Image (cartoon, grey):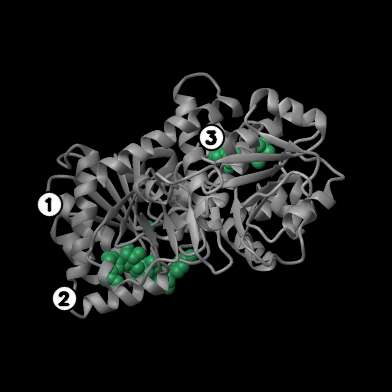
Amino acid sequence: MRTVHTVEEIRAAEDALMATLPPGALMQRAVAGLVSTCARILGGPYGARVVVLAGGGNNGGDALWAGARLAGRGASVDAVLLRPDRAHPEGLAAFRDAGGRVTAGDDVRAGAALARADLVLDGILGIGGRGGLSDDAAELAARARADAGLIIAVDLPSGVDPDTGEAPGAHVVADVTVTFGTGKTALVVDPAAAAAGAVHAVDIGLAPYLPGPRTTVLEDADVAALLPEPGRESDKYSRGVVGVLAGSGQYPGAALLAVGGALRGGAGMVRYAGPDAVAATVRSRWPETIAGPSVAEVGRVQAWTVGSGLGDGRGADVAAAVGAGLPVLVDADGLRSLPDRFAGPALLTPHAGELARLLGVERAEIEARRLHHARAAAGRWNATVLLKGTTTLVVAPDGRVRVNSTGTSALAAAGTGDVLAGLAGSLLAAGLEPLDAGSVAAYVHGLAGQRAAAAGGYPSAGDVLQQLPAVLGSLRQADTAQG
Ligand SMILES: NC(=O)C1=CN([C@@H]2O[C@H](COP(=O)(O)OP(=O)(O)OC[C@H]3O[C@@H](n4cnc5c(N)ncnc54)[C@H](O)[C@@H]3O)[C@@H](O)[C@H]2O)[C@@H](O)CC1
Ligand SMILES: Nc1ncnc2c1ncn2[C@@H]1O[C@H](COP(=O)(O)OP(=O)(O)O)[C@@H](O)[C@H]1O
Ligand SMILES: [K+]
């Protein structure tokens, strides 16, 4: 599991750790990790042309110290100081001692150095940064992006907001970010995360001083441990019965994909509620499905998945499923019929457009502030909100957040959301809480998208569905091997 902490938590942990160490020792740990990553990426620093962009804080200090060490190993290093009056004194002294050249941000030499750089170290702003880059810094960042070989961001790409994942103004767009101690929201939540590139974490010994993380990124082992495992005594009821209220005459495929997602997700049984014609289509593909005309008449279930491809005019059925007092997942058209607040476990699965409609804001505003708005909706409806997109977020009303790392644009195809709704519904029926059900489903769904894409061509939702057994099988196998 990868952890994410807030700036306040990181600063408190750093203070506690620093109190046990000689002055400057913590920065030297960070710098050692940064330099070894730079050296590895450069294939050895000797002869490399490096430019350090240094702001006036400790982030600039890290970059200047790293520049000094790279110069000491034979790199040709220029430092461009954005705030010459506030440059990190020890870092700057070490840099000069190692033979580094220093220029001011507005010096023409700065542009020339960037144009021939193999590597730019972005030390303009770190966790102290707020509100986008100043104009002079923005210009250097743009030049670096246009002209230089590779950009490595120190701790964070400068200019993004550390705690929200928002990018409120100009910012560095890095190829790699070397981050210290723990993850930051900006490294996992878009749009900021898109500017971080590949993230390398450097252990500086902070973990014992950090609180339990509110935000996490699940990995294979976490997901495998959360997946329901049928026991010797399991029967179809104890494994979970999912009710699926999805699809319509206009969108019968949504019913097929949601039921398929639920069956492949491990449900012991799926009960489909919908018109006879759609039910017949569902049963011709999934003969194991039990069908009935409405929520009230389909029989007992342990969780409901409602809304995918449902069309209009089914509000009463949605209300019946939502009001059944069972865990419920609400997707797509079902989101038009939400109660004022949920009383029991609920998982809402909007994409940005649907969340925009729910909250009465523009879609672009949702995309710019994904975590903020997912949180707002989770609080407003007392439900866990799974906001789909490049990095899917799952936000519980109590403030816990999971960020999915397996997303792929291969999933940007009609109907993949229906598969996700069925899959997450089956996990709710198996007894997972909405945060676990949503984050495990998003993870598995992303891996299925990756596998479908690797099989070649442009996968459709059906191809993604077909990959679920292989993905679940390999996660389980890895779990058994570990356990
Ligand atoms: N505290 C420590 O011992 C360690 C700190 N480390 C580094 O220190 C960094 C944090 O350093 P600082 O707290 O000095 O903060 P930064 O270096 O991130 O920022 C410096 C200052 O810039 C100003 N600023 C904020 N937003 C700005 C903007 N948009 N435009 C211009 N100026 C702006 C603020 O006054 C801020 O305090 C971390 O990100 C990490 O790189 C690491 O060396 C690990 C150890
Ligand atoms: N660019 C992308 N990168 C990663 N995942 C994506 C991308 N675009 C779409 N997805 C994923 O694809 C799925 C699409 O779901 P949705 O928008 O509900 O489509 P539909 O209603 O057609 O099924 C979601 O899981 C979403 O997170
Ligand atoms: K930085």
Q: Residue at x 14, y 76 (%)?
A: 22
Comparing 412 with 200, the one in front is 412
What's the residue type where badge 3 is placed?
Arg
Q: Which label's residue is closer to the chain start, 3 or 1?
A: 1
Q: Which mark is residue 430?
A: none
On screen, residue 224 above or below 25: above
List the single residue furthest toward the top: 457
CA gap, disc 3 to disc 2? 53 Å
On screen, residue 249 above or below 222: above
Q: Which residue is mark 2?
A: 21
Q: Which mark is residue 264?
A: 3
Q: Quadrant of residue 272?
A: top right
- Image check: 287 left or right of 154? right
List the single residue furthest toward the front: 233
- Residue 181's x, y, as percent? 29, 62
Residue 361 visible? The answer is: no
Q: Residue at x 56, y 63 (%)?
A: 396
List the single residue furthest toward the right: 313
Q: Which label's residue is closer to the chain start, 2 or 1?
A: 2
Where ligand 3 lies, by quadrant? bottom left
On screen, residue 291 above or below 327: above
- Residue 431's x, y, as percent? 52, 54
Look at discs 3 and 2 and give the one toward the viewer. 3
- Image check: 343 left or right of 47? right
What's the residue type where badge 2 is placed?
Leu
